[in-house]
Image: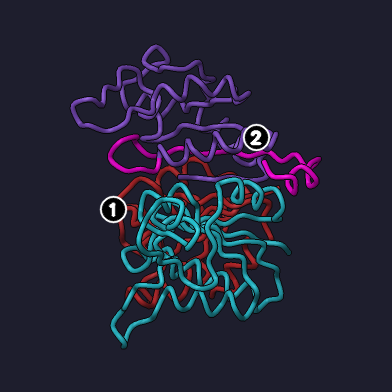
Chain colours: A cyan, B purple, C red
Amino acid sequence: MKLAVLVNEGPYTHQASDTAYLFTRAALEKGHEIFRVFFYHDGVNNGTRLTVPPQDDRNIVKRWTELAEKHKLDLVVCIAAAQRRGILDENEAKRQGKDANNIAPGFRISGLGQLIEAGIQADRLVTFGD
Amino acid sequence: MTDEMMEEGGKIKKFLYINRKAPHGTIYALESLEVVLISAAFEQDVSLAFIDDGVYEIVKGQDTKGAEIKNFSPTYRALEGYDIEKLYVEKESMDARGLTEKDLLVPVKVLTAKEMADLMESQDVVMSF
Amino acid sequence: MTMLHTINKSPFERNAFDSCLTHVKKGSAILLIEDGVYGATQGTAGATKLAAAMKDVAVYALQADVEMRGMQGRLIDGVKLVDYGGFVDLVTQHQNTQAWL
């Protein structure tokens, strides 16, 4: 089946991102297709490569990146939510006149339309949040 | 809407946006309204439900000047212009908060909790914020 | 068709648990995850309510979340444990999913 995942909270503060990751991994292991993982609200903070969690803890951002690489996942960070919270890719940084970008590998920034499209195209949409 | 989306057109799903959170203490109400506005471009069958503290999102008289925060409540009145006209409010949630339809800033259809449960079950996609 | 409802909040913190029980329809399923698993434990204020709902609704709890909170052995009889794969199965077996955030 084709599934889509919506992640509405950032890493570490809420368990939502952990649950979403473990759900996504389990769905892939079962042979389902993940049409897209969409990051909204503070969920966009899952897409910064600048996090440095303690070494004896899970690395939530890196874990998403690695899962994306392994399964060619489409990890989409909402542009409007990202702009509010300072998550930028190279293009956005240039466009907004910022001196740096911080998007993690495997993530891309795009519009809210990508979430609606996921709702239309996927057989199921599952939301993780607070 | 992108060209790619146009090509994928034809699929019409029932989308229900469930609002259960009060409007200003957290950003969820504002950002969920942004999703609803974008969804208008996709020509889907869109409904909005306001239950629990979500009913506070459409209460009249919200004045955010003193708090120096943008007042997005008038946007609910603009939804009609986007052909988003199915707004449902739960009676029990209003009752519990001492509110009636007269306190709301948009025309809505009032449903009982049981009717709301039926509405949820009839949907293809349920997004809750 | 039936729905899968997920609850991730303790019944003592917010009304997600109560609101979900008000809206869940016969034949649907509830999956308790994260802090939601406290709602599936015996001797709590919500236990009677959940037990009553279980006449019409299947109730599941995510095993990893139960265990990480030390709630194993405290679950109400009839609450079924699932792993993340079981979560995926519940999603695919129901028409849609509503998250009571």
Question: Which residue position holds label 1?
Answer: C12
Viewer-proximal residue, A120 or A65? A65
The residue that disc 2 covers is: B41
Q: In this view, does C85 lie above or below B108?
A: below
Whether residue C7 is visible to the viewer of this picture, yes or no, is: no
**Residue C13 in view:** yes
Res. B115 image quadrant: top right
Q: Nearer the viewer, residue A45 or C2?
A: A45
Q: How crowded is mark 2: few (under 14 residues within 10 Å), some or many (20 or more)?
A: few
User: How far, Cα to Cα, is label 2 from label 1?
Assistant: 40 Å
Which chain hosts label 1?
Answer: C
> Quick one: which residue is furthest to the bottom in this view?
A56
Q: Over which residues does the magenta segment extend?
A: B1-28
Residue C60 in the image, given as x and y percentages of width and height? 52, 64
* Callout 1: SS: loop
Q: Residues within 10 Å of mark 1 (few under 14, many from 20)?
A: some
Locate the C terminus of chain A by quadrant.
Answer: bottom left
The amino acid pointed to by label 1 is: Phe
- Host chain of mark 2: B
Q: Measuring 57% from the left and 70% from the top, which residue is drawn there?
A: A24
Please name the amino acid that badge 2 sits on.
Ala
Question: Which of labels 2 and 1 is toward the front?
Answer: 2
Secondary structure category for the residue under label 2: helix
B126 relative position to A102: left or right:
right
B26 is within the stretch colored magenta: yes
Q: Position of residue B16 (x, y in %)?
A: 59, 38
Residue at figure coordinates x 47%, y 62% from the top left: A89
Magenta stretch encompasses residue A16: no
